[in-house]
Image: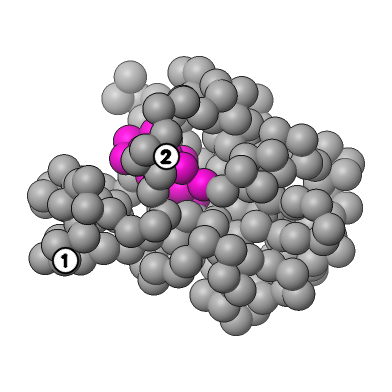
Amino acid sequence: MASFSDLSPYLYCHHARRAGTVNIGWIDLSPDDPAASFPSLPVHFDLESSEPLPAEFIEKLWQFCACSCVHYRGFHLCNLGECAKKREFVMPQATCNGRTISVGCSEIRVFGKRGIIYAAPTLIFHYITAHGYRPPMAFIDAVLHGPQPGTKGYFLRMKDLGLDYWRLRANGKYKMTCFDEPSFWQRCWIRAQNGARRLLERRG
């Protein structure tokens, strides 16, 4: 996955570029990079702050990650800290309040003030909870007080962007919201996610 400075213009996926979209939480460090050895991390991290992020923010961010867009055919692994030493090629997971989703294979959109749109990889949840990444306050405020996934306001904002998205429902299955006819790869992604959920259920 590429690395971009927070609040820089979003350019990663050409078909998802929209005016006013900025990057949040795009962190990719080589295991051989000296910056990958915590705490010598780039400006994405606020290691001087002792105040924890609100639990409400973590819970709402998870809901955004469970309502993702711009899905990739593969997935990205975390290569920060201890994660860089692991040899497991397994899709990362994010758990909140007993519910687990796969991350590292898609993005989220969060709507802020003055028309700003925050684009983040779903791995942002892991970066925050496992590595102490602290996003800018404007993003935190947008997650807490902006349009929320599952609401009409969020649906209309995503419709304005023309970005299809997938939301995890209460029954544990994904629902696809498409503003055009879903592509072959979109249908495959849904089947793969629901298949992975059933496998995890069988493993207990």
Q: Give the image location of residue 154, x and y in percent.
A: 81, 46
Give the numbered dot on residue 128: 2
In magenta segment, residue 65: no
Viewer-proximal residue, 42 or 101?
A: 42
In the image, farthest residue toward the bottom = 14
Secondary structure of the residue carrying tag 2 is helix
Query: What amino acid type is highlighted by mark number 1?
Result: Asp
Q: Are marks 2 and 1 in contact (CB under 8 Å)?
A: no
Q: Does residue 171 appear anywhere in the picture?
A: no
Q: Does residue 113 appear anywhere in the picture?
A: yes
Q: Is residue 29 left or right of residue 61?
A: left
Q: Give the image location of residue 4, x and y in percent.
A: 45, 69
Region rendered in magenta: 122-135
The quadrant of the picture occupied by the C terminus is top left
In the image, farthest residue toward the front = 48
Give the labeled residue for mark 1. 33
At x 61%, y 74%, the residue is 9
Viewer-proximal residue, 13 or 171?
A: 13
Looking at the image, tell me whether mark 2 or mark 1 is earlier in sequence order: 1
Q: Is residue 33 left or right of residue 41?
A: left
At x 36%, y 30%, the residue is 200
The quadrant of the picture occupied by the N terminus is bottom left
Secondary structure of the residue carrying tag 1 is loop
- Would you identify the image quadrant in which residue 69 lies? bottom right
